[in-house]
Amino acid sequence: MKKFSFALVVFALSFKVCLGNGNNMLDSANRAYAQKKYSYAITLYEGILKNGLIAPELYFNLGNAYYKSKNIPKAILNYERARKIEPDDEDIMINLKIANSQTTDRIENPHEEIIKVWKRHFFGLSTERGWSFYSIGFFIIGIGFILLYLISSRILIRQISFTLGGVFLLLTISTSLIAWDKCSSAALHTEAIIMAPNITAKGSPDEKGTDLFILHEGAKVTLLQTNGNWQEVRLANGTAGWLPESAFEAI
């Protein structure tokens, strides 16, 4: 296990940032963080995000800056956004766990289905881009075997080539679906972090609704249906209630 640290993650972008002064902003944000100017670093990181650059390392660094600024709910929010892209990254998970340990609410689901756990870990073996590359690679290999099947005159080679060609084409479809699923999941906002110091969930989408339970900043909820400025949410233990949209921020 890596030694835990809230040190700045130094990362190299694999593509050119087409944001005008985006690279300068990133360098400035990293320097500000290294110099412990966390408020300034937050402003710069947020500015980069608003310009369209999305990367788990960026959310991770932003989460670290918020943590150093004692803004725990914002730190959790950005660690969760980083984890949404890189579900099994060890550093993200460690920092998220430490930030969560400083929240008031302890809400867990002791009955999470094993299939969901397996799916989360399996899908987290690579990024959306990684699964896309696997899909392309499997497709090329599969086409190669199909071509070998078509040009070979030996029965054994044709049988093996046809079988392997089919296997790799099935792998192509599977990895493509995984990449698509990760892309769709990243675009959906199905969870949120409570930002209000404390908020009472109601039994109906109205201030006069029955008080059900109280949530504190940093708690994580699943978003259900919307009614006006109210959102129905569900906790990990299955409890549900209505909150005003101003009380949380979507992951």
Image (cartoon, grey):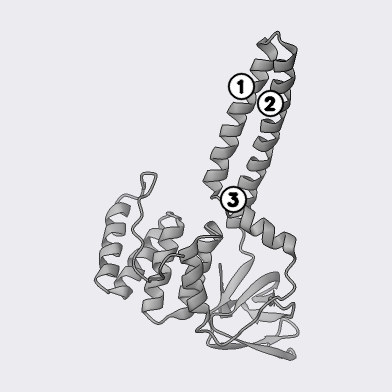
Marks 1/3: CA–CA distance: 28 Å
Q: Residue 247 appears at what percent x and percent y?
A: 57, 80
Q: Residues within 10 Å of mark 3 (few under 14, many from 20)?
A: some
Marks 2/3: CA–CA distance: 27 Å
Mark 2 or mark 1, earlier in chain: 1
Q: Residue 181 appears at what percent x and percent y?
A: 65, 50
Residue that label 3 marks: 183
Residue that label 2 marks: 165
CB atoms at circles 2 and 1 under 8 Å apart?
Answer: yes
Q: Name the mark nearer the viewer: 1 or 3.
A: 1
Amino acid found under the numbered disc labelled 1: Gly
Q: Name the mark nearer the viewer: 2 or 3.
A: 2
**Residue 16 lies in quadrant:** top left
Residue at 69 percent across and 27 percent down: it is 164
- Name the disc covering residue 51, or none: none
Amino acid found under the numbered disc labelled 2: Gly
Residue that label 1 marks: 144
Q: Nearer the viewer, residue 245 or 157?
A: 157
Q: Nearer the viewer, residue 13 or 1?
A: 1
Q: Horizontal placement of 100 versus 233: left or right?
A: left
